[in-house]
Amino acid sequence: GAGVSQTPSNKVTEKGKYVELRCDPISGHTALYWYRQSLGQGPEFLIYFQGTGAADDSGLPNDRFFAVRPEGSVSTLKIQRTERGDSAVYLCASSPSGGPEWGQFFGPGTRLTVL
Amino acid sequence: GIQVEQSPPDLILQEGANSTLRCNFSDSVNNLQWFHQNPWGQLINLFYIPSGTKQNGRLSATTVATERYSLLYISSSQTTDSGVYFCAVEGGTSYGKLTFGQGTILTVHP
């Protein structure tokens, strides 16, 4: 079946603008995760959804970042008043449930560049 | 939070050689995964292995949870094995949150 998909694959924006990044998880996966990867680093956790609710948002860096998953499937990561330091690859992952039996499966990422 | 250290940071091999990558972690874990990040940035699941040993073709992994480390073995390496290998753990009280190591950059020359 299809894997995790993310759109857009690349996003270039100007400092101060608002952006939305979309994630479509693997069909039937109830858990969804967002991570951010800077150049030369491992991915860093942002937020974890179990169904429609955010089970853990402790990784969101500040209140400019917000994520939703209104119907328990597709999720959108929203960044307000973008800053150059927000430039990174944003990765989405999903898993069959909150339990880790199969692990997390990652999408290809959205490369965000803030000019 | 839980700390994850990977070694070596870089590894250069000739095609056909074997290698061992190590992941040390600082606390008990619910989940441990090994990933290969290919040159296009895609994270590919290699193993879900919070304990025990698994094998998949030329790759195998062992996690000794009581001693807080995991090893990834690559045998008969191929140029397509090049990329970054990440170990990621879900700490005992941090359900859903994977903490990644810094990765091992593997380069396999023909």
Image: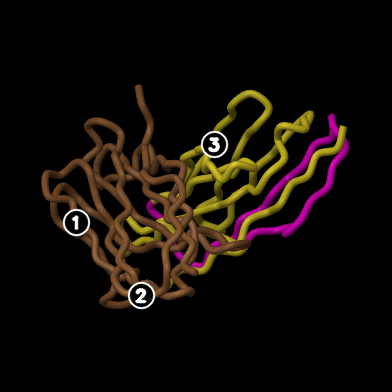
Residue under label 1:
A68
Q: Secondary structure at mark 2?
A: loop
Membership of B27 in magenta stretch: yes
Where is mark 2, residue-wise? Answer: A16
Quadrant of res A46: bottom left
Categorize mark 1 by other alpha carbons within 10 Å: few (<14), some (14-19), many (20+).
some
Q: Main secondary structure of the magenta part?
A: strand
Badge 3 crowding class, 10 Å Cα cut-off, few under 14, some 14 to 19, many 20 or more, is some
CA distance for labels 3 and 2? 39 Å
- Where is the C terminus of chain B found, in terms of image quarters? top right
Q: Chain of mark 2?
A: A
Query: Residue B24, percent across and down?
Result: 59, 60
Q: Nearer the viewer, mark 1 or mark 2?
A: 2
- Examine the rendered structure and indicate whether residue A57 appears above or below residue B23: below
Q: Nearer the viewer, residue B15 or B1?
A: B15
Tell me what hue chain A is rendered in: brown
Is the residue A74 above or below the residue A3 in the image? below
Coloring basis for residues:
by chain
Q: Position of residue B19 (x, y in %)?
A: 77, 42
Residue for point 30% across, 61% down:
A47
Q: Amino acid at mark 2?
A: Gly
Horizontal relation, residue A29 to residue B90: left or right: left
Label 2 Cα crowd, 10 Å radius (few <14 / some 14-19 / many 20+): some
Q: Marks 1 and 3: which is nearer the front? A: 1
Cα–Cα gap, marks 1 and 3: 29 Å
Of labels 1 and 2, earlier in sequence is 2
* Amino acid type shown at disc 3: Leu
Tell me which chain appears yellow.
B
